[in-house]
Image: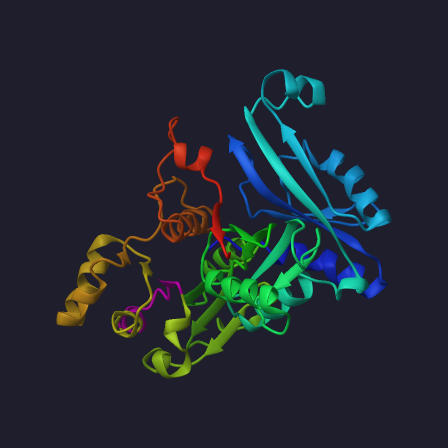
Amino acid sequence: MEALLPPLLPLYQRERAAGRAFVLAAVVHTRGSTYRKPGALMAIAGDGSYAGLLSGGCLEGDLQEHASRVIESGAPCTVTYDTGGADDLIWGLGVGCEGAMQILLLRVGPENGWQPFEHLAAALDAYTPTAVGLVSEAGGPFHAGQVLLAAPGGGPAENAVAGQLGRLARSERPSWLESEGARIFAVPLALPPRLLLLGGGPDAVPLAELAQRLAWRVSVYDHRPAYARADAFPPGTHVVLARPEELAHELDLSRFEAAVVMSHHLPSDSSYLRALAASSIGYVGLLGPAMRRQRLLGELGAAAQSLHSRLHAPVGLDLGGRAPESIALSIVAEIHAHLHHRDGGPFAENDTERVNSDSYTTSLT
């Protein structure tokens, strides 16, 4: 549920409008502790500017040099960095992460129809799951650097890969595919989470801002014209002015992953919770103290049972701070942890899943 593409789109749109080729850098393999994991993406322009991060800034300078050569030659390349021990000192990076990272660099330009960005951007705009395949090693009809899409229309081998990409589209995990000797790195499009704020008061603004910083899609719903104002929220926020009891008719609640009830108006919050109880939204947050929660759940009666495992009230992690921005941070942090199936606790020193997680291989032959 982590949005990876949106931060790269402004650079893509700028370079495409100017007709300038640029480079897509994709992490395809990691070992040990690394800043990013397989599937992380970065776009690098010919002038050295870039979007996205594959490290904390320590590898990007060298990647710019490699990207410049890929743009000039058109030939893809794979770069490996080992940030542990003596190799780290040889690179002069001094990172000390004790991990290794392999990055595939591909030229993106008019000669290949601006793929995979053209395909991914269209799918993101339509909020449609998809995946793309990046050919790392040539084999059969596939050449290194080729971009494969989750759409039929090629030969038997290409269509087989397209079918596999289609099946991987709803996966959050990248994969290695093998077909006729070719190695293909499959990257599913990470669709951004959709957050519904039920109440558009002043404290909803920093919450929308933080969520959009993470590239989440935010909708705000309020019955008060003074609060349901698009100009009060970040650009791109979907703002709806309607009565609380009309919520289920005005919006398709099945389209949201999380909702926060924060109107500060008891009758409105009661209507919102009733609609959410009948929905499938996996995270429901309620602003306010425990006594207010108990009163609202009591008004729901038997309908409150369907909220039992989904309701977070009082909403947010206990981070301290009482300012609207602090509360917004605690709410976004809790939703983020929920979407990533985490408990919001501190990192454990033996967190082997984060350190060693990598992609897997699926054979098409």
The one of 357 and 288 positioned closer to us in this rendering: 357
Left or right position of 306 against 203:
left
Picture coordinates of residue 239 (x, y %)?
Answer: 51, 73
Name the residue rendered at 85%, 62% in the picture: 18
Q: Is residue 264 magenta?
A: yes
Residue 222 image-quadrant placement: bottom left
Q: Is residue 147 above or below residue 316?
A: below
Left or right position of 28 against 330:
right
Picture coordinates of residue 153 (x, y %)?
Answer: 62, 74
Residue 347 image-quadrant placement: top left
Left or right position of 127 against 148:
left
> Does residue 281 appear in this view?
yes
The one of 329 and 280 positioned closer to us in this rendering: 280
Picture coordinates of residue 77 (x, y %)?
Answer: 73, 43
Q: Is residue 308 above or below residue 103?
A: below
The one of 230 and 225 positioned closer to us in this rendering: 230
What is the span of residues highlighted in magenta in the rendered image?
257-270
Here the colouring is rainbow
> Does residue 233 appear in this view?
no
Name the residue rendered at 71%, 37% in the picture: 60
